[in-house]
Amino acid sequence: QVQLVESGGGLVQAGGSLRLSCAASGIIRKINAMAWYRQPPGKQRELVATITSGGRTNYADSVKGRFTISRDNAKNTVYLQMNSLKPEDTAVYYCNADVVTIDYYGKDCWGKGTLVTVSS
């Protein structure tokens, strides 16, 4: 099995910063793209940022210039540095990874989420 565990969420004032981490573990041969999604209260889940195994990144327009996604391939870990946070960034943040297992199966894996609350 493959597990993704997020950490780093919490309560922060508007204008502040948080850094989320997501560590993947289990029967992993390789991780292709990794991503962060979020689900604001009462809304649908939305893509925040993606990063390929080679480090190419892509961001939702709403977070460009404020959020930075990065990864440490040796640690099977992806990060999301969030700066200049706004109340509308309040959401449960989920980690996603496109994993190839040791027996060559492809798995779309999700973490359980971490709550980020930005107060005004």
Image (cartoon, rainbow, N blue to C red):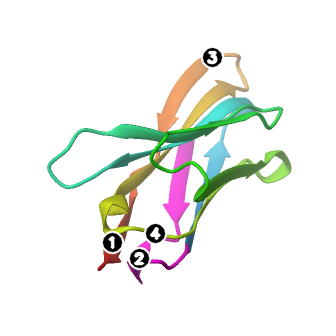
Return the residue at label 3: 105
Residue 113 location, quadrant: bottom left
Name which of mark 3 and mark 4 comes first in the sequence.
Answer: 4
Q: Earlier in the sequence, mark 1 or mark 4?
A: 4
Dot 2 amino acid type: Gly
Residue 1 in view (yes/no): no
Q: Nearer the viewer, residue 42 or 73?
A: 42
Q: Secondary structure at mark 3?
A: loop
Q: Which one is in front in this view, the residue at disc 1 or the one at disc 4? A: 4
Q: Count residues near mark 4 (Cα–Cα under 10 Å), then give few for <14, some for 14-19, many for 20+.
A: many
The image shows residue 30 at horizontal and vertical percentages of 76, 30
Which portion, as a residue range, is magenta? 1-17
**Front position in the image: 81 or 22:** 81
Verify CB contact (< 8 Å) between mark 2 and mark 3: no
Find out whether the residues at labels 2 and 1 contact each other: C-beta distance under 8 Å: yes
For badge 1, the amino acid type reads Thr
| Residue at image location 50% in from the left, 79% down from the top | 16
- Give left or right: position of 76 versus 74: left
In the image, is residue 11 part of the stretch drawn in magenta? Answer: yes
**Quick one: SS at disc 4?**
loop
- Residue furthest out toward the left: 42
Q: CA distance from mark 2 to mark 3?
A: 34 Å
| Residue that numbered label 1 is attached to | 117
Q: Which callout, 2 or 4, points to the residue nearer the camera?
A: 4
Q: Position of residue 91 (x, y in %)?
A: 32, 58
Write down the residue under mark 4: 85
Label 2, on which residue? 10
> For the residues marked 1 and 4, what is the alpha-carbon distance in whole angstroms?
10 Å
Q: Which of disc 4 and disc 2 is earlier in sequence?
A: 2
Residue at x 58% of width, y 59% of height: 66
